Image: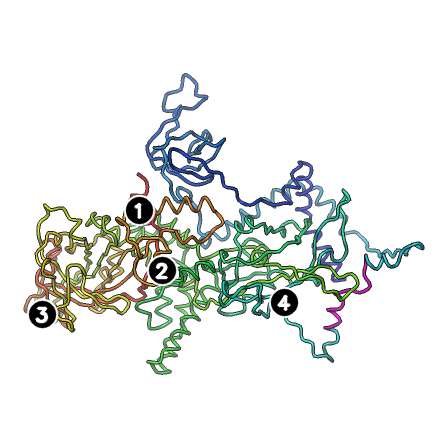
Amino acid sequence: LRMYTKMNEDLYGALPSMLHDEKLFQDGTLQEALAGPQPYNVQAATVGSDTYYKGMRVAKINDVVYRKADCPWYKPDSWCEIRIRQGTGGTVHIEEGTVKVLWDGDESGKKRDVGAGDLQVVPKEYGINQPGVLDHVTSALNTAGSWVSDLFKSTEASYTNLAELLSGSLTKWVVCGVAENVSYTELDNWLGTEDEAFQEHVKEAYSKWTGYEKKLPGEECTEDPLVDTSKFKSCKACDYTELHEDHPEKYWRADGQQDKFMCPLEPPMSPPDQLEIFRRKKGKCLLYMTSAQQRQFQWHYHGDFPARKQNNVQDNSPREEYQLVKLLDISQSKGPQQVSFGRSCTVEERKANPRFCRTPETQEPWPSVEEMAASVSSWLGGAVGVPYGAISDTISNYQSILSQNKNISEKAKEAAVALGEQGWDALFGLGRLAHRTVRTASNQVAYSLPNEADRHARLERELFGYSDGGAILHGLSYQATIGASDTTSNSRNRYRRYAVECDCDEFDPGLELALRWQWSETALRAFLEAVRQEPLILDQQAPVVEIRSEARMFFKQNAEHKNNSFYAYGAAIRALVDGNAVPDDKTSQPVECHMERNWLVTKCVPSDKCERQDWWSHTCKPKGSFVDTGAGAHNAWKVVLDGKLAEQVGGNPLGQAAFPSLKALTVHFHCGKKSDFGETGGPRTLPGTFRSCLEAGVKDNALRRAAEPWKLYSPDEVVVVAEFGTLDTTQCLADPSVKSKLCADGAVEVTMLDSHLDGQAKKSSGGMYRGMRTGSGFPKGTVKEVTLKPEDILTVNGMLVG
């Protein structure tokens, strides 16, 4: 009875897709829909010496005006013009071997002819406002369900009549006799004399006496030849169903041809229940085929169309180019937001370039979970939309890290791992807004970088995904033939369906989103500020930027105040430029040297101009030839104009701040192919200039992506790595009367420390200037490095197009 009830429910749920397929049949397109999209065959054509691929994005290099074809003679020219401005995006189309472009905003919808000097290749997101998966969860649900709604409306009458018929129906069993002249041998060959599914049920029925214990599907994972450990390190196969061809019996189509199909030997678990078994395994990821990869390798999903054949007779082997995902939240409610998951890199990249697969490592960890929660919640810009599973994983992972600290007492550990109500509220965004809303607050808009929302949305899509339960289970599934069992007279060919489970303890998508967002934007701000102050930094091979906070002391003129001093705060930046890149007509200025610490390594910077005072010393001096060099004028400190960048190093606090909150950062930028990078440092082959590497990287990456849209990893992808370090030496300049205060705690006194400040910065209506002190050491939560896309640096500096 339960089976019959479920059958009726499934049939009723399948009605919209059945009616949809009926319409396709009438239109003559059903067979094409059943076959699914074919593998990619991306069309290409050339303009001049450049190759362009269908669907890729380009930008207009210069303005152009087209005239409307149907413009009345009496209309003014402005009404008849379609103006495409420099920088406008467009999509490439290939028609009869010729490149044409449909420009954004071209109301005619006409694909335009283009010349060699008209186009610039840009990333595929250029000019397209794509929402982040975390900021627009409900909108995705509405969009995905719209076609079902439209289909239902168009077939509502048929659906209603059939529903009434089913709801009032009766059920009868019909038993047919066997014909007198039948061949029982032939009948046995068709129907079989035993049932393999029944054999499985018998095992369970006698388990009380035999001790047979059946595992839940997918619960047990084993090393298996199907998952080659030389390719898939620390990965196992997790069988969760067995399918038999022609089960329970063969089927012929109306044209007399046998239809090849297979069905599970036993009814499978529902997708959310099966996925929950996989999700419960801690520190594990699953190998996942994206929708583009399912198309390329012909692993089509028909779960949205229950009336269609669901299981094709085919092998589907795991590949290294598939990515690893971590299941986060699973709902029983069917829909495009039913399952959330975190996206890691591909198995191929994890093996070839593990550096680019790790969650960023912190230089200066937070001493407690509470402090981590406060920072991470603010960096997420409101945690609304971040899956609960991602946040809870972040908390438990950090608690585990702190609990392993052998340098503190057990009581201190308990305090460090505790998370109060305020921390929970901050992380889960109670009373907060999503990222796109938060950034519109007045204190954010003033300091927002160009295309900030688009970068955040792209990062969300890189790290998170949502899917219907059946669809993602299909993308996690692989299939292999294992032959017939020969345990019954009509044993049929069998297939294993399994998932591939891999270790991924280090993957923390929630923390990775927070760290990558915060520190990639910090790196972009640092480089933008450096270019403003010193454009020659673009001509370096591997630019270096230093930022430090500064506290200027003022004495109140009213002597009645007991505490008669106060501080004004700011930050300074220095773009280190190689002397070879500096024009000869620039004035000289001594090089300023200091000690930098990065990844526990200390060195004098700038390294080409500075050296240790003595080999054992922690102080630095200019090298002989750089004591008075023309390059020095281009290595001077300058005032930071970006308030958010100053805030990052403690130079823009609320109210008065203690000296320990004054921090400093150094950022080393490296540009190159992923395959050229080792575990640390820059690429093995340095580019001609940083800018040339960025520009070539944008074009090469876009072309490669357009040619093979299903590929997630390429060793030739050009990236920018920003490595963070700090300045270890606190410096000061003080009036003798306040030297003991400003230069306390080992600060080194430096003459001309405030030479970059103008007279206005040394004035205050409430006091007299007495000196200054600089910051040192890492801000809390600073990462060792982040990876950027070359277009991000060009975009924030207004240099992507043109």
State the residue position of label 2.
Answer: 379
Q: Position of residue 495 (x, y in %)?
A: 66, 60
Q: Are marks 1 and 4 in contact (CB under 8 Å)?
A: no
**Is 396 one of the magenta-colored residues?**
no
Q: Which is the main secondary structure of the residues drawn in magenta? A: helix
In the image, which is nearer the foreground, mark 3 or mark 1?
Answer: 1
Q: Which image quadrant: the N terminus?
A: bottom right
User: Which callout, 4 or 2, points at the residue further toward the start of the chain?
Assistant: 4
| Residue sitting at the far right | 180
Q: Position of residue 442 (x, y in %)?
A: 31, 51
Between the residue at mark 2 and the residue at mark 3, the CA separation in whole angstroms equals: 37 Å
Lower position in the chain sequence, tag 2 or tag 3: 2
Residue 612 falls left or right of residue 426: left
Where does residue 26 sit, x and y in percent of width and height?
Answer: 69, 37
Residue type at the position of mark 2 = Trp
- Residue 496: quarter of image: bottom right
Sequence-wise first label, 1 or 4: 4
Looking at marks 1 and 2 on the same chain, the residue that comes earlier in the sequence is marked by 2
On the image, the x and y values in percent for residue 97 come to 48, 32
Q: Secondary structure at mark 3?
A: helix
Q: Residue at x 75, y 68 (%)?
A: 199
**Mark 1 vs mark 2: in front:** 1
Circle 3 residue: 739
Residue drawn at (50%, 31%), measured in percent from left and top? Answer: 96
Q: Which residue range is magenta in the image?
A: 190-203
Separation of marks 3 and 1 at Cα, in angstroms: 44 Å
Name the residue type under label 4: Pro
Query: Of the numbered discs in the image, which one, if any, rests on residue 217?
Result: 4
Q: SS at mark 4? A: loop
